[in-house]
Amino acid sequence: MAGYRARMPARPTVISDDAVMRVTQWDFAPGAETGHHVHGLGYVVVPMTDCRFRIEDAQGEREFDVAKGAVYRRDAGVEHNVVNAGTEPMSFIEIELK
């Protein structure tokens, strides 16, 4: 595919997984990505660092900053690729609600 640039994958580490929730820490080097995925569960994100996100989805690409500790949530069904668009490593905790 013309213009395609392979990126390194972000590193997920499952911290806890039980009947109620799954907690995963995501660590991204600059430019790392999750890869396109669909969230089957609602989830909460807790940034552990300041994050410069690039979201790639059906609407296109957009970048935005989320400060360390600025919690947000999304419903199940979100489809996207998450990229570290910053120049520093970033990390967040994702809590999926079963």
Image (spheres, helix red, strand yellow):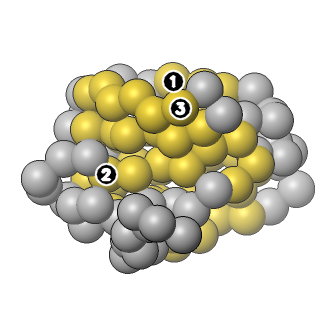
The alpha-carbon separation of the residues under discs 2 and 3 comes to 16 Å
Task: List x then y, in percent, for residue 37.
Answer: 69, 54
Task: Report which residue position mark 3 lands on.
Answer: 60
Residue 72 visible in the shown view: yes
Mark 2 or mark 3, earlier in chain: 3
| Label 3 environment density (alpha carbons within 10 Å; few <14, some 14–19, many ≥20) | few
Q: How many marks?
A: 3
The quarter of the picture where the N terminus appears is bottom right
Q: Position of residue 85 (x, y in %)?
A: 26, 46
Among the two numbered marks 3 and 1 on one chain, the one whose residue lies closer to the N terminus: 3
Helix, strand, or loop for circle 1? strand
Above or below residue 87? Residue 5 is below
| Residue placed under numbered mark 1 in the picture | 72
For the residue marked with disc 1, what is the amino acid?
Tyr
Name which residue lies at 11% across and 53% down: 87
Q: Rate crowding at label 2 as few (under 14), some (14 to 19) or many (20 or more) other CA atoms within 10 Å.
A: many
Q: CA distance from mark 3 to mark 1?
A: 21 Å
Q: Position of residue 13 (x, y in %)?
A: 51, 72
| Tag 2 near tag 3, CB within 8 Å | no
Q: Are discs 3 and 1 less than 8 Å apart at CB?
A: no
Expressed as whole percent of the image width and height from the top left, the position of residue 11 reads 44, 73
**Type of amino acid at the residue the image marks with label 2:** Asn
- Residue on which disc 2 sits: 84
Mark 2 to mark 1 CA distance (whole Å)? 17 Å
The residue shown at (81%, 42%) is 41
Question: Can residue 66 be seen from the camera position used here?
Answer: no
State which mark lies toward you, 2 or 3. 3
Picture quadrant where residue 42 is located: top right
To which quarter of the image does residue 91 belong? bottom left
Quick check: 91 left or right of 61?
left
